[in-house]
Image (cartoon, rainbow, N blue to C red):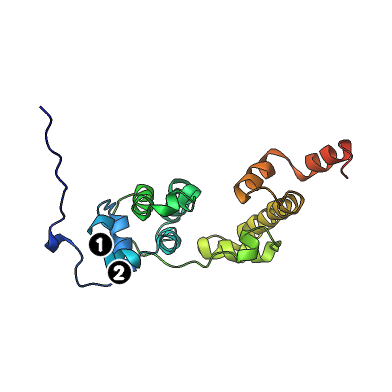
């Protein structure tokens, strides 16, 4: 015999009534992997829910270098990879759950805002210098020594320049495709291929 499905109602006292959306309470909820937090928001709070802002805040924490690396890498791999996909972008509760999945669930952490790379750098419209890249990674890893950051900056700017060149040659490709292409072909291999194809 089929049973009638009933809609699960969230008790009013468990909703976050009479409050504005609080970014820091949301970060605390992510730190404890509270998958139901979004469902408890009021309609007004949901309108102010800013998933990309939470993504940026969540990725960086104070603490040991291992903890910092975990938050940064896991947020990038588990949440950021498909976070702004046009389909997923239509489902903020799913975005919330992706952020929860990225959290280690070990309790409240101190999160801090790290500015992202400029839009033109992120969209592969312009190159980034080794110094700019080193400064950016210095904000992500404040405990890293300057020599390591300089080396990281040098390598990052080299890889980024390759991606910018690919983006200029193939404007029809999405950034994600450019990223993959840059991993498959080194700059030297690409030049050799285009030379053999008569496109150079």
Q: Is residue 117 above or below residue 186?
A: below
Query: Viewed as shown, does residue 166 lie left or right of 132?
Result: right
- In the depicted view, which residue is nearer to us: 155 or 90? 90
For the point 27% across and 54% down, the residue is 32
**Quarter the C terminus occupies:** top right
Q: On the image, which quarter does residue 16 sit in?
A: bottom left
Q: How many marks?
A: 2
**Disc 2 and disc 1 in contact, CB within 8 angstroms:** yes
Q: Residues within 10 Å of mark 1 (few under 14, many from 20)?
A: some
Query: Viewed as shown, does residue 91 lie left or right of 12?
Result: right
For the point 37% across and 55% down, the residue is 92
- In the depicted view, which residue is nearer to us: 141 or 158? 158
Residue 71 locus on image (x, y percent) = 42, 53
Residue 137 in sight: yes
Residue 181 locus on image (x, y percent) = 68, 42
Residue 21: mark: 2
CA gap between label 2 and label 1 equals 8 Å
For the point 63% across and 49% down, the residue is 174
Which residue is under mark 1?
A: 41
Residue 62 in sight: no
Residue 48 locus on image (x, y percent) = 35, 68
Q: On the image, which quarter does residue 49 sit in?
A: bottom left
């Amino acid at each position: 015999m089929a049973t009638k499905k009933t809609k699960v109602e969230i008790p009013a006292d468990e909703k976050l009534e009479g409050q504005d959306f609080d970014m820091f309470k949301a970060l605390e909820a992510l730190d404890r992997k509270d998958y139901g937090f979004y469902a408890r928001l009021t309609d007004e709070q949901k309108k102010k829910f800013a998933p990309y802002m939470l993504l940026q805040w969540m990725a960086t924490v104070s603490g040991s270098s291992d903890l910092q690396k975990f938050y940064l890498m896991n947020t990038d791999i588990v949440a950021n990879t498909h976070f702004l996909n046009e389909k997923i972008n239509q489902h903020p509760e799913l975005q919330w759950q992706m952020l929860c999945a990225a959290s280690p669930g070990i309790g409240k952490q101190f999160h801090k805002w790290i500015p992202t790379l400029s839009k033109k750098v992120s969209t592969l419209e312009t190159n980034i210098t080794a110094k700019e890249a080193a400064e950016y990674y210095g904000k992500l890893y404040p405990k890293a020594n300057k020599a390591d950051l300089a080396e990281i900056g040098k390598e990052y700017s080299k890889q980024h320049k390759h991606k910018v060149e690919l983006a200029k040659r193939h404007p029809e490709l999405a950034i994600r495709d450019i990223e993959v292409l840059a991993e498959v072909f080194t700059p030297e291999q690409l030049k050799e291929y285009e030379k053999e194809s008569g496109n150079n």
